[in-house]
Amino acid sequence: MKKEWNILNFFNMQGLFLAIGFSKILISSKEKFLFSILIGYILGMILLYFLDIKKKNNIFNIILYSIISVYALVILINMASTMYLNLMSKSMISIPLLLLMLYVLNKKEIVLYRVSNIMIVVNICIYLFALFCLLPYFDITNFVYTHTKPMNILTSGLNYTILSTSIVLMTKENQRKDVSILKTYTLATIFLIIDCVMIYGIFSYPLVEVVRYPEYVLLKKISIGGFIQNLENLISFIWLFNIIISLVYLTNSIKNCLPNKKIINLIVPILFIFASIVNKYYVAMLTMYKYEPFILGITSLVFIIFNYNFKKKNHK
């Protein structure tokens, strides 16, 4: 089961970068984003290796899981609306996603692991295909020197740690000093570094600063033989799958906290309603995006402190 859990976390470590993760790190740290990612990676390794968490199945943890779930839902629904279904209302987009999540959540947990095992192969193959197609557009001269404040590099590193470890830390249990999760984290970080390098090397800073969803717009350049084009919707499936897997796993953690597992069929629609409220008010959505590191970081920190202290208390 540990192997399947690590494969699942390959998706969880990348899911929250969708939409604003890449943009925030690249805009803040500019061409020095590699230093930020390295700082974030080291901090993430320390947290994943040393933290020993004993999850407590109670209403407090349900609330914390729900906060991250609503955040991920807002990102996913907005991305689907902007890039794929801009003529359809966000409420209509939410319905099939809601039904999909409820279907999976009413199955045994092993189904989620099996899907992840299959899709990681598909994910990597699509990823390598996209990388190969984008290499001709890469321009090393886009990495021109600009003045970047050391504090920006540091804060971007902290943001990387938060985005890449929040879901994993909130769903791990009894896996302190587990080397296998560090291998998964390293692989996910390599993929994310390649993403950032390609985005910056193809767009350069001025475009990165203004383009929304740069990881998606980048894929518009892909074609096969110069005549098979518009493949970005198919290839960007890897991003959608990352965040859908993260969402299902978070809501599955909510289900595991419930005395009656069927209650999840009521909770998930409520999460969608909250996400719809945020999506309805543009100011609320912008506020969420602006304070993303604080929302995710504080939620994860409270979860870690609460559950870690609870375990220590039991040992006295």
Image (tube, rainbow, N blue to C red):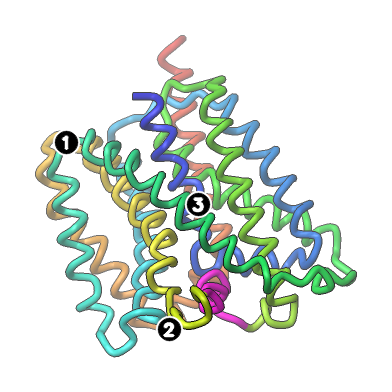
Q: Position of residue 147 (x, y in %)?
A: 89, 70
- The residue that disc 3 covers is 14
Specify the farthest residue to the bottom. 87
Q: Position of residue 263 (x, y in %)?
A: 12, 46
Please give the name of the residue rendered at 70% of the width and 57% of the height, measured from the top-left corner: 156
> Nearer the viewer's eye, disc 2 or disc 1?
1
Please give the name of the residue rendered at 39% of the width and 57% of the height, measured from the top-left corner: 243
Q: Check if residue 213 falls in the magenta segment.
A: yes
Q: Is residue 27 visible?
A: no
- The residue that disc 1 covers is 108
**Tag 3 secondary structure:** helix
Q: Amino acid at mark 1?
A: Lys
**Residue stretch in magenta:** 211-222
- How many numbered tags mark residues here? 3
Q: Check if residue 147 falls in the magenta segment.
A: no
Density class for disc 3 (Cα within 10 Å; few <14, some 14-19, many ≥20) is many
Asked if residue 20 lies left or right of residue 64, the reply is right
Q: Amino acid at mark 3?
A: Gln
Q: What's the distance in space between the residues labelled 2 and 3, CA to CA?
A: 25 Å
**Tag 2 secondary structure:** helix
**Tag 1 secondary structure:** loop
Density class for disc 2 (Cα within 10 Å; few <14, some 14-19, many ≥20) is few
What's the mark number on residue 282? 2
Q: Position of residue 31 (x, y in %)?
A: 79, 65
